Structures are given as C-alpha cells and as structure tokens.
Image (tube, grey):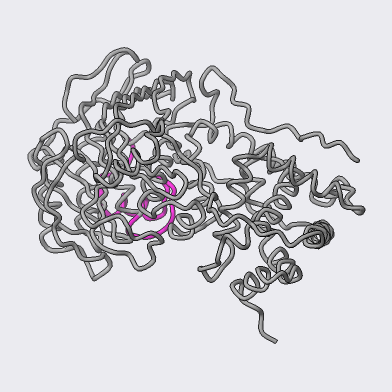
Amino acid sequence: MSEASDRALWRAARNGESTAFGILFERHAVRIYNYCFRRTGDWALAEDLTSATFLLAWRSRHREALRAESALPLLFGVATNVLRNQRRSLKRSREAYARLPLARFDEPDLADEAAARLDDRMAMRQLLTVFARLPRREQDVIALCDWSGLSYEDTAAALGIPIGTVRSRLARGRRRLRELAGGGGPEVEAEIVPRPIEVNEP
Amino acid sequence: MTSRQAPPPERDFPAERLELRRQQLLALIEAEQQPQRRRVSPRRSRRWPFGLAATAAVAAATAVAVTALLPAGSGGPSPAAAAVLRHAARAAARQPAVEPPAPGQFVYTKSKSLFMDTAVTNQQTIDYYEHVTREAWIGPDGSGRIREAESTPNFVTDADRAAWVAAGKPDLTGHRNSDQTWGAGGLDYLNLSKLPTDPAQLEQLIEHRTIESGPPGDAETFTIIGDLLRETYAPPGVRSALYTIASQLPGVQLVGKIRDQLGRTGIAVAYVSHAISHELIFDPKTSALLAERQQVVGTDPSQVQPRVPVGTVLESTAYVSSGIVDSTSAAASAGP
C-alpha cells in the first residue's frame, strides 16, 4: 500500500472527494496547528484557526492548483491569511460550523500536558510581545522560515512573493529582532492576543 | 549572548481533538456541497496588497556592472577573494581601538537603505524600492532609540511604474516612519569586547551559532560575519579575525571595486546563494564596512517567480556614520 501524494489528494479534492481532503487534514493539521499557536500564543484559538484554515483551503481548491509536491506551503499561505484577517475568518468559519447539527465545541481536554502547554503559552506570549513590534510582513517570513522551518522557496510560494523578497524581509526582520530584547519594550503595551469571538448559537 | 529567541517545540494535535475536527470539517464540506455545486470565482485574490505609496522617481540605486559570479559551494573561497580579505584582516588589526560605550553612552549607527518590495493589486505586481534612513542608539544596558524615516519610493522598472498607473496609482504606504525609545533591557546590546581574537576560536563560536543564532550553512555564516562587522566598536583584533574567517569561507568570491549608493568606492566580496549575491563592501584602507547589498545574479531553478531580472538589486544598505555618543539625541559625525 503506497501513500497517496499530496498532489493526488488535492486533485481528488478538486473533483469533489472530501475524504481525500480529510487525509490532507490528518497529514498536515498538526503543522498548521503549531504555526497558529506560535502566531497567537493560544492553544484553543489555534485549533479554531486550524479548522478555519482547512475550510478556507477547501473552498479555494479550484483557484489553487497544487504545483508543489507538498500541500504545506499552500496551507501555510492560507493560514497566514486567516491569521491576518483573524476576526473575520474565525467569525465566518465558526458561523459555518455552528450550522452543523454536531457542532458543539468542547473545551480541549489537555489535562495530561496542561502544565507544559501553559509554560509554552507563557513563553510564546512573551516572545510575541517583542515579535509584535516587527512589521507584519517581516513577522510572516520569520514565522514561516525560522519558526516553522519552511524553505525560502516554500515561504515565497506560501506568501505569493518573490524569493528575493523573502530573503530580504527575513534579513531585515532578524536584524530588527536581534535589536529587540525581551524587556519592557516601548511605552505602549502591544495587544497581541485576540479575544475569542462570540458566536451566537442558532 | 543571543537574543533571537526560539518558540517552544511543536506539540501534538491531541488525537481525539484531531478526529473531532476532521469529522466536523468533512461534515461541513458535505453540507456545503449539497445545495448547489457553486463555482468559485476564478479571480485570484489570495495575495494582499502590502501597500506603499509612490511617486515615480529616479532609477534604482547603484547601477554597477554585474560581475559574473558562480554559485557558491565549489571548494574553498576564490583565491582573489581570499587575498583581499586577508589584506582587510591586516588593515583591521592596525586600526586604533575604540572604547566600548560606558554606562550611559550609546552606540550610534546611521544607515541609508533601499529595499525592493512588491505590491499586489488585482492581477498585477508592482516592484518598487523603499528608501529608509535609519538611526539606532543602543546602550550597554539595552536602553536606546531607533528612528526610521522613509522617503519617496521609486519603481524598479518602467513596467512597474506603468502597472502602478494602470492600477490607479494606489497609495503604496510603507508605514516605516517611526521613532521609539526603550528603557533598559528593551534593545539587545551585542557585547563584542569579550570575543576571542583568535580566528579559529571565533569561528567555532560563529559555527555553533553561539553569538548569533540561525540555520547552519556557509551562507548564514557569511551573513553573521556581516552582522558582526557592522558593530564598529568591536576591538580591532575581533574585526581582523572576522575578515580572516571570511577569507577561509568556502564559496566567497571577489566582486571587485564598486561604488556604494553614497558614491564611496569600496571592495566587494560576495556569497552567492539561491542565485542571489550577498555582498559586503568595505574600505580597503581601514576595513570599515561601508555597505551591504543583495543582488540577483542568475536564475534559480527553484525560484517560484523568476521574473526579477539578473542585475536587480534587492536590498542595499550604506552605513553613513557611526560612533559612541553620550545621549540618544546626539549623532556621531565619524564615518563607519
């Protein structure tokens, strides 16, 4: 039994086979989930953002041919957009899910790892207060290249920008980040953690 | 010594949550497919405008002949590059030592940069240069100030300008004008005064990414050497060792004598990676770092959008002045 390639699964998804898309979800959700956590410092929010990312990716399947071997660059690109328009994307996706009969979101039960995840959250939020001072586009390339380990090519593909721009933004962002230590930061405290959005249950 | 913090390691998506989320996703997809098989608009809108305002302007920065550079990785450094870098190492060692900043003092650096960026409107992309003048004051306790001012951008080619006009002259705003002040601990002061002056020892620290973190590989090592050479208050012995390390780095090539965007002549050495030449331009007499530049020198087969022509400058920074100053309102008059 050989594993279907991302490209084959994406092609099947474009032909309307949702199960193929389900396999892509199983394969890549964890990377997107961690990426969303690192951008927000919130595990529960990261789950919602992951769902929103895959829903949006599904809806865009006809627009986006998969040229690369892996669907990950494309998914990271969608996730970056979802993160950028977080309130709107989440609201839409939660409204969509709320229409489902089974759509009750339970709080994640992560008791076994709760302490470690709490530590992650503290560390990540501290890092993000510094990170938030970078221009958004520099945040995007650092989060994709340095945090998620994407190559320059994959980052360029994810963001739809030339590879040279990836390199120059990365250099600028790293340089800027190097200058910004943990510390108090400028006088204004950046609001970086979005509040969950209330969705009225039907 | 490094402050480029890394996020905590990745964690599992808890299995039962993953399964629940998968079921929900599939249920939603099924539900959306039932009513009508809607055609999604073919318009590509995944990209977003980055912004930046522009009036047209003069042609790009530093038009200099593109020397034919080979991709890196073939054996050691080019003999010519090694020779000029060894010479630079000797010149650096002869420079008078600069006292590191005392408490209450600041390392001041002023630079002028241009950065290529890309705005996206509907179907068109517009390449343009942002021009940024940057001043940084960083004290040994991490306090300081960073001021950035952006001047009028210009387009990379006439076609970019035409695309901008066709798109209705959108406001391409860079949002890079800023002036921020930090208290102690806000900025990262890179203390170079304690680094070894022995090239082999210093190279170990760089290779292990102890001084500055980053991915492995010679391209990144070259970048880190550039970062450290930028810090003008490093002792002459350390600066000399950095040039020595560069002279032994596989893949480093000599570009030759070039003029930076302030019109100063310097010697450029380069490391080519992904068809982009990363160049350090230094004064052969003093070994001071005058400028840095990134330029497209070929076609990278892995490049997603190979539309940036050979010879295009992606980024260029000239160091205008630097020195130790007594306050965050003082500017040093000395050259780099």
Q: Nearer the viewer, residue A51 or B278?
A: A51
Task: From the top left corner, tell me how far across and down residue A87 is, in percent.
Answer: 69, 36
Q: Is residue B113 above or below residue B160?
A: above
Q: Is residue A140 above or below residue B330?
A: below
Q: Nearer the viewer, residue B213 or A125?
A: A125
Asked if one can make out residue B289 in the rendered structure from this viewpoint, the answer is no
Location of residue B55 (image quadrant): top left
Quadrant location of the N terminus of chain A in the rendered image: bottom right
Judged left or right of residue B219, residue A144 is right
Task: From the top left corner, tell me how far across and down residue B283 is, in percent.
Answer: 12, 40
Looking at the image, the residue that sits furthest to the bottom is A1
> For residue B239: magenta?
no
Task: From the top left corner, tell me how far across and down residue B195 is, in percent.
Answer: 32, 41
Residue at image position (29%, 64%) is B299
Location of residue B318 (image quadrant): top left
Judged left or right of residue B5, residue A43 is right
Total numbered circles:
0
Quadrant location of the C terminus of chain A in the rendered image: top right
Task: From the top left corner, tell me how far across and down residue B80 is, in percent.
Answer: 10, 60
Location of residue B317 (image quadrant): top left
Asked if one can make out residue B114 in the rendered structure from this viewpoint, the answer is yes
Judged left or right of residue A146, residue B293 is left
> For residue B218: magenta?
yes
Residue at image position (77%, 44%) is A44
Judged left or right of residue A175, residue B261 is left
Span highlighted in magenta in the image: B193-219
Q: Nearer the viewer, residue B285 or B31?
A: B31
